[in-house]
Image (cartoon, rainbow, N blue to C red):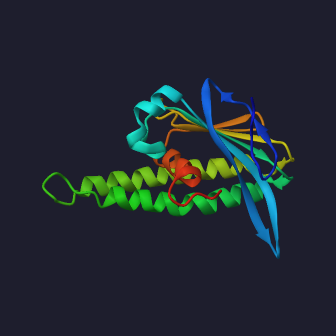
Amino acid sequence: AAVVDPVTKISFPDTERGQVCLGAGARTKRVAILDVKVYALALYVDGDKAKAAKALGLLKGAYDKTLRITLARDVDGKDFASALDEALAPRLREIATNMATKEDENGDFMATTAEAAEKAEEKANDELEALSDAFSGIKLKSGTNVIITWTPNASKKASIDIAGDVVEFESEELALALLDTYVGDAPVS
């Protein structure tokens, strides 16, 4: 049986890449007095590994996850990338700040940690720019799928399949910020 988002009526398969669907939802955007349906999304996880790591939650669980976004309307790729950048940039800054201000077991601040955090933030921002470039110049039509895959135990930590064009990321920080954008404490959808 398919999983159907109740707002957009877009349906999703029960499984994706061997993972089970946890549920579906929608992203709407208020334009003047109307709520415009932008996309529906469904989250998939490795069921057994997610159950075993339930106490860690979705963000910290070290198992593969997939998010399938299906557009409910035509969207300019540049606008999609801009919205994603707007959501990711503050999350990347917060992750980098938390890394940079980490203390050792004695409660001492470590300069090497701050330097590593700065390099990690630079790499994440470079990969975010590559993601924005991938979306620029394309028109995302209603029904287009954008599939985000998280693979925390692989060398490529995340990938985004934009209607068949795949962009991969090595940055753990970007992967975490991307996941937090959709399933963190303040998700965009």
Q: Which residue is drawn at 62% across and 52% down?
A: 129
Left or right relative to 9: residue 22: left
Left or right relative to 36: residue 128: left
Left or right relative to 90: residue 13: right
Expressed as whole percent of the image width and height from the top left, the position of residue 42 reads: 67, 41
Instruction: Specify whether residue 172 is in view.
Output: no
Nearer to the camera, 159 or 23: 23
Nearer to the camera, 186 or 158: 186
Q: Which residue is drawn at 51% across and 54% down?
A: 184
Nearer to the camera, 148 or 99: 148
The residue at the far top in this view is: 18
Q: Which residue is drawn at 57% across and 57% down?
A: 88
Expressed as whole percent of the image width and height from the top left, the position of residue 43 reads: 62, 40
The residue at the far bottom in this view is: 32
Give the quadrant of the C terminus. Answer: bottom right
Give the quadrant of the N terminus. Answer: top right
Expressed as whole percent of the image width and height from the top left, the position of residue 63 reads: 47, 32
Q: Which residue is drawn at 80% across and 58% down?
A: 37
